[in-house]
Image: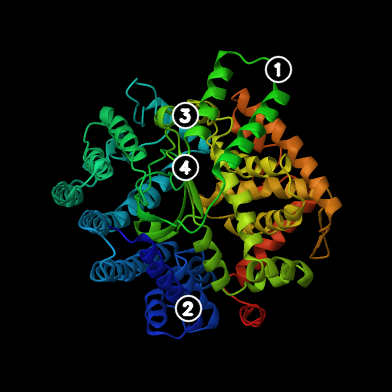
Amino acid sequence: MDNFRALNILLKHHRVELNELYLDDCSKLVKKALKICEFKDSKSARMAVLKRIVDLKEEGISNQMRALNFSPKKQRQIKARMYEFVSEFYINEFKNILARAKNLGLLRNYTYELLRGVHKIGIELSKIQIKWQELVIDQNQKYFKKNFSSKKKALEFISKNKLYQKNADKTRADRIYGVFSIDDMEILPYALAFKKEFKILNECFEDCIKELKNCEQNEQDRAYTKYIKALKDAFCECENKKVIYAWQEAERAWMDCKGDIQIGHLLEYYEDAYTHSVALEWDVRLKDSDYQIDQGLLKSNIKDTFEQILNSATQNLDESLQQMRLLVHSNIDKTQLYICNPLFYYGADFNGLFSAQVVPNDEIVSKKYGKKIFAFVDFIHASTKARPFSKLSSEIFDEKFLDYEREILFKKPHIWKKVYEISTIGHEFGHILFIGSDTENAMNAGGEFKFIEEYKATTGGLVNFFLHEIDAFCLPVFAEVLRRAVSLIAWQKIDELCAYYCEGLIHLSLLFDSKVLSFNDEKLSIDFSLNAYKRFKQASLENYQDLCQHYIQKRDASEFLARFVSFDGEVYLPKDEELKNFVLYYYGLYEKLANQVDLEAWQKWVNA
């Protein structure tokens, strides 16, 4: 019998060891990374590579390279070498964890073979990821940016030339499992774009399926084997007209896998803003049975929130709206919520892990099977505590506000975790609301659907809290919104994170409009009071109702985004002049201080 509780303990100990790397910034690992990056030894350079190793975030080394005026080509080369370095480090760590779990007798044969197979597949996908980055991001994104004056023009070209894949009913899918070939002006399924690599990948799947079949003991085992087999078929499908359906079949099989071990496959497409090539994600999540949430109450509240907003937006539900309403209720009812810890991860995940996730994105699959929501409460809490405070935060926020949040983080974990439930798990449920089977395609003419969808998701979670308020959490939630909205400015020039940056700008617009925030003489002033919370709450409720009206009418997302921001040819900036000045000021400081830490303040709280 599997001992997942013991495996979770083993996993948490390993994470503690990883987080402790921040305490030894002169280790051999750090020195090797500095050499790969061609950085001279300094505190900021060490912090940059530690962020890349421990938190898998590239922003630190990207900032360091820009400060050193490295050429774009050199930056790409160093990022690729660091990806190889980080993936090699973690793959070896995962190999050791798996071996230790086996030696301790924590896993029955089927589970061990499942994890061993996932590991072998992950190694191959991590190799392919480097080529995926070169083709999809470094080459194709550059092509579209260079050859078209706007994203809208590029999307029109993609539509005209049918550079997409189709659902079984021949409607256009909102994503592709393939690569745009510039030479041939066509989409190549991954199995053809990476033909040699996928031959090896197929062999890994075949070996895994063979071992799993020999170890099956029950219906749940057979469900997982069926899923792995469906994944193999999806990965290896060579005909464009069959690719989407093959992946839908894999996700249908995946929705029947309800055990403590949850595999994350290719799910998201944030990196590719044009053809929506799905990233090569591959990971295993392990359910944390020690953490419990009242799912019945949460789902009931979410449905009540949806009904209240829907009823305030429209009194007449036509057939299309009725179908959307039924789909939303069905998705909420069928949602499987997993509180997890990341176990193993590979491929695109070596460029950054998730804080939570709602999947699959395919509404055809979800119509029958619903969604899975993954939340990583303890993992995110431990990682946040282990990361030294940014000096930038000390420059922007006053000490009283910082201490309020830090006391919750270090001294009141129950409040921190409740805020995570409200904001982050609420965000994932927020994605479900007001989404029909064709919403994204209908609203994405300007290519900016994701830029308002992330705001819609977060605010959906907040509105659910506003309508089912608990007094004790009002200010903690408010503090989280304030801090996060400001911190998202740092992602201004990261293409794959632009949706979150724009989300932050909309939050900040409301925070400035409601006089919660003001900026003058290079100083951000915060009204962190209950009255300020109430003003922001009212502004958010009104804005969310307007946004949902926009979704109900399936209007171009760009129209809503344009109320708050404009694109200057390089980045999105707020229309409000005071807020724009703050955003420019913050980003300027970020470029200077991104890798500098306030070690003294952090150690004070760690040792308190």
Between label 2 and label 3, give the one nearer the viewer: 2
Q: Amino acid at mark 2?
A: Glu
Q: Which mark is residue 370?
A: none
- Mark closest to the chain's N terminus, 1 or 2: 2
Q: Which residue is mark 1?
A: 315
Between label 1 and label 4, give the one nearer the viewer: 1
Q: Residue at x 41, y 44 (%)?
A: 143
* Residue 209, above or below 149: below
Q: Which residue is mark 4?
A: 273
- Rendered location of residue 70, percent (x, y): 46, 69
- Rendered location of residue 18, percent (x, y): 43, 74
Q: Amino acid at mark 1?
A: Gln
Q: Relative to 429, is 480 on the left or the right?
A: right
Task: Note whether residue 488 is visible.
Answer: no
Q: Which residue is mark 3?
A: 156
The total number of labels drawn is 4
